[in-house]
Image (cartoon, rainbow, N blue to C red):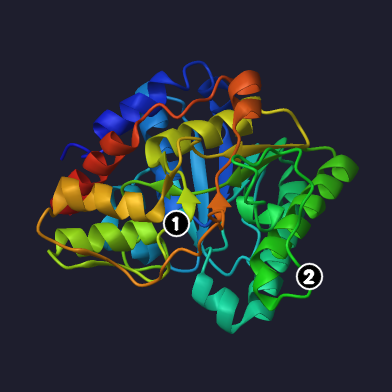
């Protein structure tokens, strides 16, 4: 059976030409392999491995590898991919050496962060510590941490795009800062381990995304809007619709993550996302117009007069200038590709 993501995966290959050779004959370890990021990492790894005959192998840590049985059985059964069942905080180390480690575990769960912030913090920090210990044990040369734009704390409303040089941080007195603080500490732990034990650490500070495998029933507004529109239901916005967001397509995300791993400067962080921003209200209406013109958009709140909107939008000049990375796929095209994949599945 042909892969329905073949066009996207060829797109990834086109924009990562020449990067894959360092994986030839190597073993790579990936945590969080059944989530949104993990599926795209595995799809692109398998495609590159098969296309270029790399003879590489990926070992993937997941709490529930069988989660792929329904959504991506071709990945679960791929001969170049094997799975280790375990918790990121205390998994047993697979035997042998690994040249690269990608730590993509720890779901950005708003529910867990709100209801059990201490567990959220402990899971992020303990999981990163365990992944770093494994990288040292396995003799890894490169370690990629998927961090988050949450490390910056609330983006100043007069700062349209937040750069890596911004030194803001989450409020340590706010329990809801557990996710952002956990990611900050994970970044610092990674740098300390890499410098002390001699492996390159690269950090990808990830913002907002859309594409196949994105959950439609989680806290991601764009996923909820797509679910409502495709069901012919009203698109309901709980707030006032003014917060500003930008969305990078999942295939471009894969390009960025692999490029940062292979070519990113050691002990550097790179924002990962798109710069073309729009409000949540504009996003809802865009999705309504494209996929469900008859469905109303209902905005619960009213904007506060004279108040600037809340923002979560990255500046990506560093990735663009150092690694020649761009948001190659427009949001309209990204939405169309995502919906086509949803309908096939």
Report the side of 300 relative to 303 (left or right): left
**What residue is rendered at 55% in x and 44% in y?**
313
**What residue is rendered at 33% in x and 58% in y?**
223
Figure label count:
2
| Residue 77 appearing in the image | no
Residue ID for mark 1: 242
Percent position of residue 88, x then y:
61, 65
Percent position of residue 1, x then y:
15, 40
Quadrant location of the C terminus? bottom left
**What residue is rendered at 77% in x and 52% in y?**
168
Residue ID for mark 2: 172
On residue 114, the disc is none
Quadrant in the picture for residue 98: top right
Return the residue found at the far bottom: 115
**SS for dot 1:** loop
Q: Is residue 153 above or below residue 333?
A: below
**What residue is rendered at 52% in x and 33% in y?**
256
| Residue 1 appearing in the image | yes
Foreground pick, 341 / 293: 293
The disc, 2 or 1, on the residue closer to the chain's N-terminal end is 2
Return the residue found at the far left: 294
**SS for dot 2:** loop
Q: Is residue 250 above or below residue 265?
A: below
Percent position of residue 142, x then y:
69, 36
Foreground pick, 130 / 251: 251
Report the side of 153 relative to 339 (left or right): right
Q: Is residue 166 above or below residue 19?
A: below
How packed is label 2: few (under 14 Cα within 10 Å), some, or many (20 or more)?
Answer: few
Gap in angstroms between the C-alphas marked 2 and 1:
26 Å
Foreground pick, 105 / 140: 105
Return the residue found at the far front: 305
Percent position of residue 135, x then y:
72, 48
């Amino acid at each position: 059976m042909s892969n329905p993501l073949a066009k996207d995966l060829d797109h990834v290959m086109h924009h990562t030409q020449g990067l894959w050779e360092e994986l030839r004959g190597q073993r790579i370890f990936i945590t969080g392999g059944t989530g949104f990021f993990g599926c795209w990492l595995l799809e692109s790894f398998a495609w590159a491995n098969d296309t270029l005959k790399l003879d590489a192998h990926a070992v993937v840590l997941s709490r529930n590898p069988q989660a792929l049985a329904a959504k991506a059985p071709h990945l679960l059964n791929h001969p170049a991919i094997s799975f280790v069942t375990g918790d990121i905080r205390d998994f047993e180390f697979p035997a042998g050496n690994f040249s690269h480690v990608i730590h993509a575990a720890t779901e950005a769960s708003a529910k867990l962060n709100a209801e059990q912030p201490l567990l959220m913090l402990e899971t992020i920090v303990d999981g990163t510590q365990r992944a770093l210990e494994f990288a040292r044990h396995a003799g890894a040369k490169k370690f990629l941490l998927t961090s988050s734009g949450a490390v910056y704390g609330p983006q100043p409303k007069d700062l349209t795009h937040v750069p890596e040089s911004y030194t803001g941080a989450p409020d340590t007195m706010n329990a809801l800062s557990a996710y952002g603080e956990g990611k900050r500490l994970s970044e610092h732990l990674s740098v300390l381990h890499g410098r002390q034990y001699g492996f390159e650490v690269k950090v990808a500070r990830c913002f907002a995304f859309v594409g196949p495998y994105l959950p439609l029933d989680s806290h991601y507004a764009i996923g909820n809007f797509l679910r409502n529109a495709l069901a012919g239901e009203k698109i309901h916005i709980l707030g006032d619709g003014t917060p500003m967001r930008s969305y990078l397509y999942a295939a471009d995300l894969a390009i960025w993550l692999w490029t940062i791993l292979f070519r990113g400067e050691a002990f550097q962080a790179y924002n990962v996302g798109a710069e073309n921003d729009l409000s949540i209200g504009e996003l809802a209406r865009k999705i309504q117009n494209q996929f469900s013109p008859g469905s109303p958009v209902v905005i619960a709140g009213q904007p506060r007069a004279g108040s600037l909107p809340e923002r979560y939008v990255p500046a990506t000049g560093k990735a663009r200038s150092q690694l020649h990375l761009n948001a190659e796929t427009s949001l309209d095209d990204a939405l169309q590709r995502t919906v086509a994949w949803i309908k096939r599945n």
